[in-house]
Amino acid sequence: MRAQPQASHFIDGAYVEDSAGAPIDVVYAASGETIARLHEATPAVIDCALAAAARAQRDWARLMPVERGRILQRAAAIMRERNRELSVLETLDTGKPLQETLVADATSGADALEYFGGMAATVTGESIPLGRDFVYTIREPLGVCVGIGAWNYPTQIACWKAAPALAFGNAMVFKPSEVTPLCALIVAEILHEAGLPAGLFNVVQGRGAAGASLVTDPRVAKVSLTGSVPTGRKVYAAAAEGVRHVTMELGGKSPLIIFDDASLEDAIGGAMLGNFYSSGQVCSNGTRVFVQRAIKERFLERLKARTEAIAMGDPMDEATQMGPLINAAQMEKVLGYIEAGRNEGARLVTGGARLNGAGYYIQPTVFADVTDTMTIAREEIFGPVMAVLDFDTEEEVIARANDTEFGLSAGVFTSDLTRAHRVVSQLEAGTCWINAYNLAPVEAPFGGSKLSGVGRENSKAAVGHYTQIKSVYVGMGPVDAPY
């Protein structure tokens, strides 16, 4: 099984290789097999990408917005036509099951390209009357943007960052995670095939040093990162040195609150989606599941049965519902958290072990009787480990749900919609769900509060993060000067 790309980088409309860069091995999570080898970007490669972006952006910004939009919409159509091919590559890159990638990855990337392609021509300024004089405003692109991706959704993240940046007249240099470097290269290919001028979307590979050189380059006006809180702190500080625009979508330890009047099956389905989808490797996951005491045991009994029915196996088999973790290091980290849960007194309801054989598989795991101070209730695990906590009253659960340094997401299941809205209004999270979980349409803003990030991705909110406002005062009469 091989997935070797034409070259490691895509710069100025063409593949570029520089074997002087340190090697990056791509390991298929289901087997441990190395399926491709790429190379990190050398300083010369990074300089080439930034120079191409700066040159191309000037002409791109002058293009009619509707023409920019047409190119993005053509790219979206190509992605949909090639969805299976792109989904297979996503599965090879991440280990996620094909059943999942066929509906959640390239398709959501295409949605972003289509949405922002349609929005491009609608971004306008305003006119402000001042009696005789007036002011008008212009929405201008920022310039060269840097996107830094995470390894869990490589195709989606590349498109979520590229689509608004390009739609509004910017250029982008995108660095995927070194763990999943393949998919962004195909996104670049497709954009170029759709008519995007050379230099506007460039992909360079690398680890932290490559990201740091991009973030601190004086040609860069904006940085958009999806990643962990520790990485976010470093990138934010580095970007601040140049007073650059920043969007950060970081980690979480999100609460999912289930009241005793909720539909039990729907609540369990939401909890499973919020913990086991993508083998639990989703930043917005609701990994602290607060269940009202009256339904706790019924909830756990049914949750156990449904969890143990999850089909694990070969990600390329469309019957497989859950695949491996991304790599051996992540698997060992998650196994460490499972051991901590046991040692600190949580009750293991199901799972808790690595599957025998090749690949980095861990059983979907549920702990009950979890308390707020346990490690598995405080730290982001990023694996298929659900912590179920008890609660009695609404006031109590709101206070406990908010008792975290994170604030990415939250969810509420209840049949009382008045209560649902009341609770959500008090939860300290940027993205919330009522009687649903982990749905993230491009039409809705996505992002967090507290240590979970700054800014928003997707929706109309992205206009404010990829453009800046210029005000123009127009004097319509003689200048009134006291000199």
Image: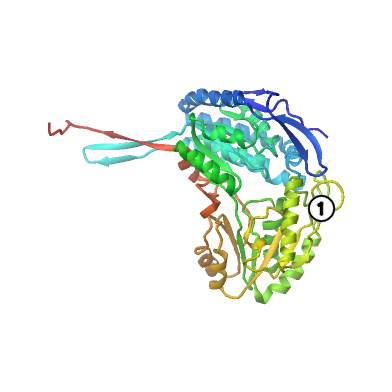
Q: Residue at x 59, y 27 (%)?
A: 46
Query: Image quadrant of residue 224?
Result: top right
Q: Locate residue 143, reporting x and y percent.
A: 48, 31
What is the quadrant of residue 27 in the picture? top right
All told, the count of numbered labels is: 1
**296 lies above or below 90:** below
Crowding at dot 1, Cα within 10 Å, few <14 / some 14-19 / many 20+, comes out as many
Q: Amino acid at mark 1?
A: Met
Above or below 457: residue 266: below
Using residue 355 as the reference point, say whether residue 211 is left or right of it: left
Depth check: give the residue in front, 159 or 460.
159
Q: Position of residue 307 (x, y in %)?
A: 77, 61
Q: Residue at x 68, y 61 (%)?
A: 271
Q: Quadrant of the N terminus?
A: top right
In the image, 194 versus 373, the foreground residue is 373
Determine whether the residue tagged by mark 1 lies in a helix, strand or loop.
Answer: loop
**Which residue reaches farthest front?**
343
Q: Residue at x 83, y 50 (%)?
A: 313
Residue sitting at the far right? 357
Q: Identify the coloring.
A: rainbow
Give the percent coordinates (x, y) of residue 423: 53, 66
Locate residue 193, reporting x and y percent: 64, 26
Q: Which quarter of the figure is the C terminus placed in?
A: top left
Q: Is residue 122 visible to us here?
A: no
Horizontal side, residue 362 vs residue 282: left or right: right
Q: Mark 1 highlights which residue?
A: 312
